[in-house]
């Protein structure tokens, strides 16, 4: 998909643009946005609206061919809802209707002339992202494993978004960010959708190496021996139940000075979670191939960061293995020793994510990070608590962590990839008491997502840290089954914002 920004001196220049399709907005109540009025010199658009062929409701569309006063082959009228300031939901609906229409049009190129700066409480950068992500979303296919791939989508391949002249440079930046995020999301979705027999820890490691080659990144992959030498007894206890070799992946991006403290993203990389000896029920177990979506989001975000050449250091850390039942697997009651030296009683082998993450979080100390965010499809309890709209956000409750939570929540709102903050309190730690080890790996049914976060918290005392439980947001079930690529938009936006706040280097 080829996107660009067009900033005509005056709106009327668009009348003379030769293009396959010019997209203009219309409102309900038979009203037109100023920009559309300026273009509609012969009054055909107003007439189409009066005819009732398009309601103007958000997402309604009408195609007109060879309209008087336009050099474009077609006009696509799209409804933006009520007139005046446009509601952001209405704009999103319009963007997705346009993207939908683009997939079936005979046109190869299009110019979008919408009032991008007139969305309520949003800026044109936001509107540009909506358009770009909608187009990528509609074009996305998960058919790489089908023997006969779906026919390649026809339609518009080249899209110009128009803005006012004085907004052009901001719009180009927003477009670059939108595309980097869309590419990161696509990578995360592709990895998530691949089956567990293809997307193994070895495959994730190879993907990281490939990313390092194609982008300005460096990859290091630790194998079983090296992981053992680091004394990651907790991580390895999960891995040993599987015949697939575990990998510990470190992917580095250096956009800041060498000595600058990096932001570290830690992603849970369970390429299949059968539950181990505490075997999961059969129904829906296939969806546990998505248990590496935290890892996928870390890879997608690092790709986006590298594509945008953000001026800061970012490191991705991914512990990856399978959780399988076997004669060598963890058994309930087993006690293992983590890299930090804390002993863990494994009361349920299906609570394996935290067993990987605790060692990865301890390993992360060596980077002296400015901030650490772990991303994990960690608990079914988080899905019960928050459903599929918000990821769970967990941090300690002090000034530094409250500020970090604010940053992440607002990055979520800005990118439409939202999170909801949950509590971490010492009172919940009680539930993790073990009679035989320093800590148990489960805290019983109450507040399952919180006790999981409390478990991780014990391994993060040396830095500022947040945990994102993406169990409800990383993929969709049912007819729309597939990875969403979340939270790549939130994490990338978070890092973009942090770069913007940095004092400029001379
Ligand atoms: N990967 C799962 C969490 C999960 C389950 C995500 C269902 C999305 C949907 C995780 O490893 C797990 O199995 N967690 C257990 C923890 C429990 C044993 C304390 C869970 O949530 O049931
Ligand atoms: Mn599990
Ligand atoms: Zn899991």
Image (cartoon, helix red, strand yellow):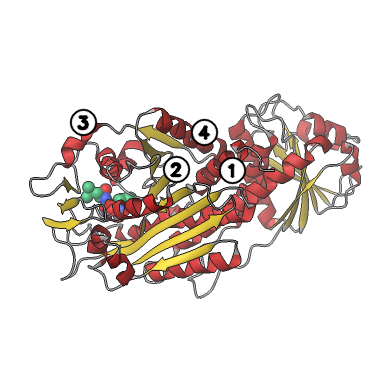
Q: Residues within 10 Å of mark 4 (few under 14, many from 20)?
A: some
Residue drawn at x 76%, y 59% as measured from the top left: 108
Counting residues from the start of the chain, the first of labels 1 and 4 encountered is 4
Q: Position of residue 131 (x, y in %)?
A: 66, 45
Residue 366, placed above or below residue 25: below
- Going from N to C along the chain, the mark reached first, 3 or 1, is 3
Distance between the Cα atoms at labels 1 and 2?
14 Å
Give the number of the disc on residue 371. Answer: 2
Beta carbon of the mark 2 residue lies under 8 A of ligand 3: no
Q: Disc 1 and disc 4: Cα gap in Å?
A: 12 Å
Tell me the crowding category of disc 2: few under 14, some 14 to 19, or many 20 or more residues within 10 angstroms, Cα based. some
Compute the Cα span from label 4 to label 3: 28 Å
Q: Which residue is mark 3?
A: 427
Q: Secondary structure at mark 2?
A: strand
Could you tell whether 1 is left or right of 344 in the image?
right
The residue that disc 1 covers is 496
Q: Residue furthest left?
A: 435
Residue 338's disc is none
Assign ligand 2 to one image quadrant. Answer: bottom left
In this rendering, which labeled residue sits more in front, label 2 or label 3? 2
Left or right of residue 191: residue 9? right
Instruction: Give the CA distance from mark 3 to mark 1.
Output: 36 Å
Instruction: Identify the residue position indicated by label 4 in the image.
Output: 410
SS for dot 3: helix
- Residue 45 location (% of width, % of height): 82, 36
**Which residue is painted at 14% across and 61% down in the image?**
331
- Going from N to C along the chain, the mark reached first, 2 or 3, is 2
Q: Position of residue 332 (x, y in %)?
A: 13, 56
């Amino acid at each position: 998909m080829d996107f660009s920004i067009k900033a005509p001196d005056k709106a009327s220049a668009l009348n003379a643009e030769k293009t396959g399709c010019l997209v203009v907005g219309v409102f309900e109540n038979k009203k037109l946005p100023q920009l559309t009025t300026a273009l509609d010199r012969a009054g055909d658009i107003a007439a189409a609206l009066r005819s009732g062929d398009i309601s103007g409701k958000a997402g309604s569309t009408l195609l007109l061919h060879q309209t008087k006063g336009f050099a474009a082959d077609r006009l696509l009228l799209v409804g933006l809802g009520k007139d005046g300031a446009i509601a952001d939901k209405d704009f999103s609906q319009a963007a997705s209707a346009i993207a939908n229409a683009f997939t079936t049009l005979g046109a190869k190129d299009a110019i979008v002339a919408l009032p991008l700066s007139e969305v309520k409480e949003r800026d044109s950068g936001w509107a540009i992202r909506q358009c770009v992500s909608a187009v990528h979303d509609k074009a996305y296919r998960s058919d790489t494993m089908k023997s006969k791939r779906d026919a390649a989508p026809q339609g518009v391949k080249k899209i110009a978004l128009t803005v006012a002249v004085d907004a052009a440079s901001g719009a180009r930046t927003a477009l670059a960010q939108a595309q980097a995020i869309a590419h990161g999301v696509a990578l995360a979705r592709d990895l998530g959708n691949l089956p567990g027999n293809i997307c193994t820890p070895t495959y994730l490691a190879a993907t990281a190496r490939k990313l390092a080659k194609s982008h300005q990144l460096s990859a290091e992959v630790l194998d079983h021996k090296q992981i053992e030498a680091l004394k990651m007894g907790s991580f390895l206890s999960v891995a040993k139940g599987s015949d697939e070799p575990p990998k510990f992946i470190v992917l580095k991006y250096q956009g800041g000075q060498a000595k600058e403290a990096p932001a570290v993203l830690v992603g849970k990389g369970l390429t299949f979670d059968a539950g181990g000896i505490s075997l999961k029920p059969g129904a829906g177990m296939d969806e546990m191939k998505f248990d590496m979506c935290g890892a996928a989001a870390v890879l997608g975000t690092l790709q986006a960061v590298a594509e945008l050449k953000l001026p800061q250091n970012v490191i991705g850390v991914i512990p990856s293995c399978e959780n399988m039942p076997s004669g060598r697997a963890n058994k309930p009651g087993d006690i293992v020793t983590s890299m930090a030296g804390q002993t863990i009683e494994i009361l349920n082998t299906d609570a394996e994510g935290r067993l990987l993450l605790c060692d990865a979080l301890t390993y992360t100390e060596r980077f002296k990070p400015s901030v650490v965010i772990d991303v994990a499809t960690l608990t079914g309890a988080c899905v019960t608590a928050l459903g599929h709209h918000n990821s769970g956000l967990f941090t300690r409750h002090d000034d530094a962590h409250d500020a970090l939570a604010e940053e992440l929540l607002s990055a979520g709102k800005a990118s439409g990839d939202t999170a909801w903050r949950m509590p971490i309190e010492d009172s919940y730690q009680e539930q993790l008491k073990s009679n035989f080890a320093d800590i148990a790996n489960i805290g019983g049914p109450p507040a399952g997502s919180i006790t999981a976060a409390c478990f991780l918290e014990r391994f993060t005392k040396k830095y500022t840290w947040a945990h994102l439980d993406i169990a409800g947001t990383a993929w969709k079930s049912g007819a729309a089954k597939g990875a969403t690529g979340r939270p790549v938009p939130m994490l990338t936006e978070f890092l973009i914002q942090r770069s913007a706040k940095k004092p400029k280097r001379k």
